Amino acid sequence: MENKTAEKAKKGALSIVFSRTALILLLVVVQFLLMLGIATYLRDYVVYVYSAMNILGAVIVIYIINQRGNPAFNMTWVLLILIFPVFGCLFYLYVKSQLGTRYIGKRLGRLKLDTWQYMEQKQEIIDDLRLSKPANANLAHYMKHQLGFPTYRNTKATYFACGEEKFTVLLERLEKAEKFIFLEYFIVEEGYMWDSILDILKRKVQEGVEVRFMYDGMCSISLLPYNYPKTIRKYGIQCKIFSPIRPVLSTTQNNRDHRKICVIDGKIGFTGGINLGDEYINRKVRFGYWKDTAVMLEGDAVQSLTMLFLQMWNVTELKPDQYKRYVTPMSAELHRELGFMIPYGDSPYDNEDVGEEVYFHILNHAKKYVHIMTPYLILDNEMLDTLTRAAKSGIEVCIIMPHIPDKWYAFAVAKTYYRELIEAGVQIYEFTPGFVHAKIFVSDNDTATVGTINLDYRSLYLHFECGVFIYNNPVVREIESDFQKTLEKCQRISIADLKKISPLMAICGRVLRLIAPLM
């Protein structure tokens, strides 16, 4: 028995060592070491190199400081160059010289223009919104004119307080698909959830329904085989990997597709925090109970989710897509009771931090409260100031975090913000049954956003994300009700609790906070 166990462990270790993932990591490390080696070699010419690098470093630092973008990222680069002048300069020039990043940015820009005509803004909707809440009309103007995302009416929203609820409805709606199904997810893992969905997709293809399925390349590291798209295509399903992981140091591979979108016939759209894995429906326990949320849209606003998917799908396509085929006629009737909806996407290539702007908008225009669920709390100065300013102004700012984290290092960094937030009046709670993966803001019983955007640098600045801004729709009260029910299962964190954090965890958190923009 012991021999069999040892043999099994040996085979498992060998499979890891000689796997494609290990090879990719090895090659990336080799590239990194090569760059470091060049920097070390140049030390032999220390006088000349030091002088040249001082001049180059000064030029680069001045350039970085005057560059557009988040100051925290800029400061990280400045620290790297000041501490490691040779390596820092070489690494910065290497990162900024990559053509792949520019290509993707330009390609997405062209695709946005191609789909712009299918996301028209009805002026009467903006006029109605301005009469109801002028500040939201200003947000709508920004969303449309800077990013191309219109404001819609006539859209019913259904809120799901957990993955199990969404999964049941998702299967029902997929079964009713008649024309097309679009799926775009960050994580897909073989198991009960994905297998159940795949079975339906196979049947739908046989019925003549067009099915497109896209997932992020990180899945190929540990969750799915690298050639998995070939397997899926055998069933008649169009499938592709967004940004496959390759053994090359590249900034493009730092920009992951973190979106979760499902569109059915252009009439039904899903988004939120729920990926396609068994932990998201609590059939597999990883970090206690997995608390997640999602929203389903029915009506006019689904059009933006359709176009968001097609934009990402066509990044690597050579032939133009037939966008008009996927346009759904807008409703002729006006249902005022459904309020206003703005589905939106966030891209690291458009110089617009859309997700953060939505969060700022809700915090800055709240009158009574802002309630937040987020799995991570890694904040830049602007977000930290906005949260504390709102609390100091008498707004009830309440944040629900996980009690059982999925990443200890992210949790350690989050803890470093607790004291400043609590002292400013922000209430922080931890969900004791397990892990919170939800990403919601809800305010004043009339405003909410549900989506994929975490309160950390990656979601706010580096990843492709999406969400829905909701105003005056009955679903807002459902979101707030869920928040209150979740709050009953949480423990409030006090200043006294912070003193119980181990010194090692506190030190790790403070050190890691210096490189938080890279986490």
Image (cartoon, rainbow, N blue to C red):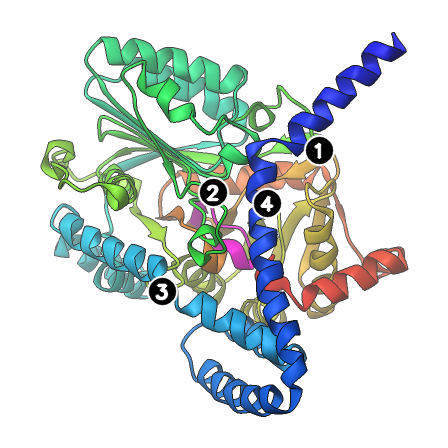
- Which of the marked residues, 1 or 4, is nearer the chain's N terminus? 4
Q: Secondary structure at mark 3?
A: loop
Vertical side of 151 occupied by 404: above or below: above
Q: Secondary structure at mark 2?
A: loop
Q: Residue under circle 2?
A: 245
Vertical side of 146 occupied by 83: above or below: below
Quick one: label 4, few (<14), some, or many (20+) residues within 10 Å? some
Q: Residue under circle 3?
A: 352
Residue 461 seen in the figure:
yes
Q: Position of residue 430 (x, y in %)?
A: 72, 46
Which disc is residue 287 wearing?
A: 1
Magenta range is 448-459
Apparent side of residue 452 relative to residue 29 in the rendered image (left or right): left
Query: Which residue is found at the position 75% from the left and 66% from the top?
Result: 511
> Is residue 458 shown in magenta?
yes
Q: Nearer the viewer, mark 2 or mark 1?
A: 2
- Asked whether the beta carbons under mark 3 and mark 1 sit within 8 Å of each other, the answer is no
Residue 130 placement: quadrant: bottom left
Q: Position of residue 69 (x, y in %)?
A: 44, 72
Give, as a three-letter code, the residue at label 3. Glu
- Asked whether the beta carbons under mark 2 and mark 3 sit within 8 Å of each other, the answer is no
Apparent side of residue 357 relative to residue 120 in the rendered image (left or right): right
Residue 516 placement: quadrant: bottom right
